[in-house]
Image (cartoon, helix red, strand yellow):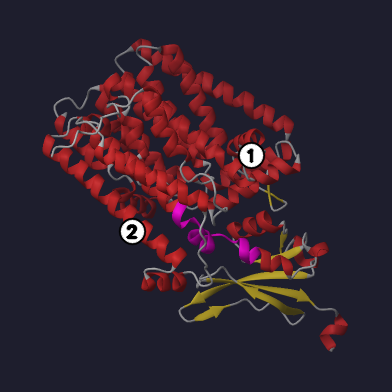
Amino acid sequence: MRFPALPHSLKLPPTGWTLAGLLAFYVFAGLFGHDPWANDDVIHLAVARDFVESGHGFHLSLAGQPFFAPPLYYWSAALTEAISGWLLPTHDALRLASGLWTALTLMALYYAGREMYGPQAAAATPLLMAGSFGLIVYAHEAQPLLIMLTAISFWLLAFALLPRKPRPAILLLCLAFLLATLGSGLAGLLLLTLLYFSVFAFFRTARREAGRLFFALAASLALLLAVSSLLYLAAPEWFLGWMVREWALLSGEWRYGREIWFLIDVFPWFAWPLWPLAGWTLWRNRRRLLQPDIMLPLAVLVVLFLLLPACFPVRRSAAMLLLPSLALLATPGVLTLRQGAANAFDWFSGMVFTVFAILLWVGWSAAVFGYPTKLAERAVVLKPGFVGQFDLWFFALAIIVTLWWLWLLLAMPRSPYRCLVRWSAGFTIGWLLAVSLWLPWVDHGKSYRSVATSLAAAIPEEHRNCIAERQIGQAQIASFAYFEGLRFLPLHGEGRNCQWLILAGRRLQTEWKWIQPGEEWRRVWEGNRPGDRRERFRLYRRETADEWHD
C-alpha cells in the first residue's frame, strides 16, 4: 500500500513572513523564563534595573555604586522594560533588549546578503548567522556586545550599498559609528575606525566612492562629538568617569600574543559551521578573490581577527564579532555545495538534532519522574538538592517544538536551502528544548537566588545597605543586589564602618582558602550555590567591645 506524500508546505528559499517567523523563533527562543545567570547576564541586568528604578537620568550604578560603562544597552533595556514590563518579569523585560539588537543584526545581514549576492541568496546570510555555535548563548542573555555586533553588520551593509545607494550607505555608516561608541565605548570606536581605514583600499580606484566614504567619516565624527557634548552637559561627573575608565582599558597591559592565540583556539568550534562553508566559497572563487563580493567580507574578517585582541579583552563573547563577515563569506558556499556534500550536511543536521532531542527528553524524564533511575541519581549528584517538577506550560511548549522538528524532517522539498534551513531550525529547536525541559535544573545551579535569599535572611533589614565586602566578584555583587536588594561597600574603603562583612572563599584542591578578617568579626553564616564546589561565602558580624571580651 502506498501512502500519499506529505505536502511540501515550507517553500524554499524562505521569504517574507516565513523567513521572518524562522528568525523571530530564533531571537525569542530561550530569551525568557529563566533567572539572571552568573557573570555577564546578571551584571548587566542589575545595572539596567538600577537605571530603571533609580531615576538618576544618565547615571549608571551597580548595587548602589557608580558603574562606568557605555550606556546604550541599558537605555535600550529601559525602553523594552517600559514597553513589556507590565507583561513580563523585570529581568525578562530587560533582557528583551538583547532580542532587539539580535534582530537588527539579522536584518542588516539579510539586506547585505541581498545586495551582494542577489535576492535568491538573501535568506542564507541571516540563517547562517543564526546557526553558528558562537552566537546562541550570547544572543539570549543580557549582553552589551550585541550592539557592537549590530554596528559591524550595519557597517558591512553600508559598504555593500555604497556604489548603488550612497545616501543610505552614508547614514548607515554614521549609525554604525554611533552604535559602536555608545555600545562599546572607545574600544568600539577604535575598532570600527581601524576597520574603516583598512578596508578603504577597496575604493582606491573610484574617486566618487572615496569622497563619499570621507564624508561619512567626517559626519560620523561630528555626530559623535555632538552626542558626547550632550552627555557631558547632562551628567558631567559620570561622563568623565566613563572616559577615564575607557582610557584605562585601552592603555592597560597589552597581551596581544596570548589573546590572539586564545582567539585561534576558540575559533574552530565558535564559528562552526561557518568556516568550512566560507572555505568552500574561497576555493570555488579562487580566481576572482579580488571581486568586492568576495574580498570585502574576507578582508573584514581578516582585519577584525587581527585587530580584535588589540581593542577588546578577548573573551568568547568578543569572538562573536567575527561572525557577520564570516556569515556573508559563507553565503555563496552553502548555496553551491555539491550534491553529496549538501546531502551529507542535511543528514548530519537531521541526525544530530534528533538524537539531541531524544537525549533531552530522556534526561527530563529522569529529572522529573525519576526514570531512568541511574540518570536521575546522576542529576541529583551534579545538582544536590534539586527536585524536578512538572511544568505544564514548558511541557506543552516542548511538545509543540518537537512536533515541529518532526515536520521539518518530513516535509521539506529538495533545494540548496534545505540543509541550511534544517541546520538553523534544528539548532534553534535544540536550544529551545534544552531551555524548556532543563531550565529548572540549570537555574538550580547557575542562579544565585537561593544563596542570596539565605544570606539576606541572616542580615537585619536595616543593615542591608551597608555590608562590607572583600574579594566578592562583580557577578556575585550584582546577583545579591538583584535578588535581595543587598548593597556592598569595599572593606578598605567606604565599608570600613559597616557592621557586617562578607568574604568569598576559593577551593584549592581539597581545602578552602579564606581571608581571616580579624578577631572583632564573628562568623554568623556560610553558604554557596547548590552543587558549587569552587565557591563559598561567609558572613561576619562585627562584635562590640563587650561582646568581644565575653
User: How many labels, in total?
Assistant: 2
**Closer-to-camera residue (146/67):** 146
Return the x and y of residue 432 as percentages of the image width and height: 42, 47
> In the rendered structure, which segment of residues is drawn in magenta?
436-452
Judged left or right of residue 107, residue 127 is left
User: Label 1, on which residue?
Assistant: 87
Residue shown at the point (41%, 28%) measured from the top left:
20
Q: Position of residue 155 (x, y in %)?
A: 42, 27
Q: Is residue 191 in sight in this rendering?
A: no
Q: Is residue 446 above or below residue 525?
A: above
| Left or right of 260 on screen, residue 245 | right
Residue labelled with disc 2 = 359
Residue 209: x, y in percent? Answer: 37, 14
Left or right of 211 in this view: 507: right
State the quadrant of the N terminus.
Answer: top left
Give how far apart the Cα atoms at labels 1 and 2 are.
Answer: 33 Å
Q: Earlier in the sequence, mark 1 or mark 2?
A: 1
Three-letter code, disc 2: Leu
Q: Give the residue at the far bottom of this rendering.
A: 550
Q: Quadrant of residue 78?
A: top right
Q: Residue at x 39, y 50 (%)?
A: 256
- Is residue 404 or residue 110 the one in the foreground? 404
Q: Which mark is residue 412?
A: none
* Left or right, residue 341 beside residue 426: left
User: Principal SS element in the magenta part?
Assistant: helix
Reply above or below: 143 against 109: below
Above or below, 482 against 525 in this view is: above
Residue 145 appears in the figure: yes
Residue sitting at 74 percent across and 64 percent down?
467
Badge 1: residue crowd in 10 Å (few <14, some 14–19, many ≥20): few
